[in-house]
Image: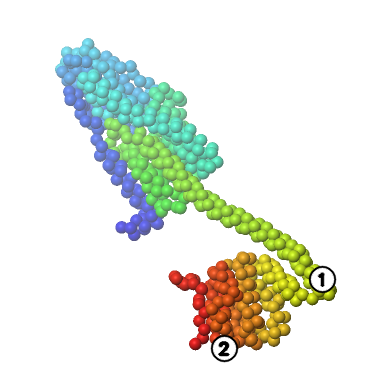
Amino acid sequence: MTAALATLRQSAALRFLASAVLVSLLAALIGTIGPLPDLEGVVRHDTAQRCRAGTNDCTTVTLPDRLSRGDGPVEYRLEVARGTLEGDLKAVLIQRMSDSYALRIGNTPLSPPLDPGRQGWSRPVLALVPGPVLTDADMQTLVITLSALPPREIRLAPVLIGAHDTLLFRSNLVMILRIGMQRIAFGLCIFGVIAFVGLDMRPETRTGTYRYLAAACAAAAIVLLGGVFIVPFLPLMTWIAVWTTAAHLAIFAFCRFLALHVGRRPSGLEAAWLAAIILGAGLLFVLPAEIWRLCQLAISMVDLVFLTLATAGLMAPPRRDRNSEDYVMLLPMATGSALLALYWLELVGVTPVRTIETIQFAPIAFMCVAFTHVVGQAVIGQRLSDRFAARLSSEVTLRSGELIRTHETIRKMERERAIEAERQRIILDLHDGLGGQLINMQAYLENSDIQDETLENAIASAMADLAIIMDSIDAEDDVTTLLGSLRNRIEPMLTRNNLRFDWRIEEPPAGLTASPAHSVMLLRIVQEALTNIVKHAQADTIIMECTRDHIAITDNGNGMADGQRAGGRGLSNIRSRAATINAALDITTGPAGTRISLRWDPPQPGSGIADIQPDA
């Protein structure tokens, strides 16, 4: 089933065939709707004598009847039993006739005659039958005189005779179904003209479709004028030319709207169709009425073909910018086409004249198509607006996040610049202030006769501490640089003590937090370890390791004495500083030397600074 639907959508010929079948089925369904039911106490006359006016040349006909050549007048004579007309107030109801009429019983008129120029063929005729007009005969003759100017036809539907009140209700019902529907359609068309012109004038909705819809509504309103108003606007022949041309133009404009809706470009056939419509209006005044009528029927057939093509276009696969509205538009579009097809079949004589026409419902069906398009476009616009709003909201959120991150980066950079400026100020203050004073004190001792070794060592130690502090401040986030600076400062001392320095620096520990405080602590630990090696280990080699997970200082001296292993002040300081920088301290000592290691592995539950475990 799904594959069949896909094939139907892709094939234009199959779509046209399917739309033709759909229109035919709907026309057959609408055609099964019979006349209004009979009324109790009302006599329905379905036969009459059709006579040439003023003669006895008559033919028995079945009603509804039609004469294709409207060059009358023609008399329809009905024999009515006297009993049918006696009693309460009686009336005669003609539900459908054209064009001009006159009613009489015998020689007594029942209603004022209607002039052909008044174009009142769409209205029912209700005439009272006063008692005095009846004769003594058992059968009374009701004469209905009809005439029409070519190319109009003479038509007469079954005649109802009965109580006035009953027939008045039926007459009002016929007026609602016929004239009332035309007035509703006329009002919708006028509203459509105003609405679609307004939509076409807006830049955001100026797609061309509303222009054709406005033209279709304007042409349809002209067509409906004859049914809505009984007063003539133009001479009859001119009005017929305007009426028929407006009907064709309404269908042409509506088909062009649907072509634009489905994305189909204009074709040469449509241009020829439009030319035939315009030419056909002028031929009314040149060709004989019967030939002109045949031309109009042919153009109407072309109208039906293009309406079927437009219906088939709604079955095509929807484009990305179209909504499922096409499938909603399909039923009223096919219904309107079916109503026009039924009217065309009646005009050519394939189907009998209907007592109640259905053609007046066609404009309403097509207006449903137009308004469905408007609603569908509004739905599409709302969806696009929602998508754009969602995308805009997402973009705003994204850009806001980027702005916040940028702002935080700028603040961080400003903070880092401020910290760097403060760091440089502190370094300069230490170097120029405290450092200068220590150098001056050292120079003073060297140039004076005072020999105070304790003071000299204190000044040298203070200058070394000051250098470590300045190095830690100057390179807070680069451990390898800090260790390199420390090496440069202590290497002369190691050389004086005949110690070889094996430098194995790979990369800074990942777990060490970069900050001046931690940098000072780390340098103090390394300095303390190197100082202990120089003073106590009696080693000749020192190995300095720095990897991603640890820093280790190893010597090949004679190990720590028992008193030192118990914990001197130097080791106590090392333990305290290791804990401060979140490092796990491990000290291994033995006759082959001592190894002090700082690790930044994730801490295990219950772990602490490792105890000194001498080699066995």
Residue 257: give x, y in percent of width and height: 46, 43
Q: Residue at x 44, y 29 (%)?
A: 239
Q: Residues within 10 Å of mark 1 (few under 14, many from 20)?
A: few
SS type, badge 1: helix
Residue 479: give x, y in percent of width and height: 63, 72
Work out which quarter of the rendered image holds the N terminus and state it.
Answer: bottom left
Q: Residues within 10 Å of mark 2 (few under 14, many from 20)?
A: few
Vertical relation: 81 (above or below) 211: above
| In this picture, residue 154 sits left or right of residue 272 | left
Q: Amino acid at mark 2?
A: Ala
Q: Amino acid at mark 1?
A: Tyr
Residue 410: give x, y in percent of width and height: 63, 56
| Label 2 to label 1: alpha-carbon separation | 44 Å
SS type, badge 2: loop
Residue 54 appears in view: no
Q: Residue at x 58, y 70 (%)?
A: 577
- Residue at label 2? 592
Q: Quadrant of residue 297?
A: top left
Q: Which numbered tag is attached to residue 444?
A: 1
Q: Residue at x 72, y 72 (%)?
A: 458
Residue 322 appears in view: yes
Observer-nearest of 110 and 149: 110
| In this picture, residue 594 sits left or right of residue 178 | right
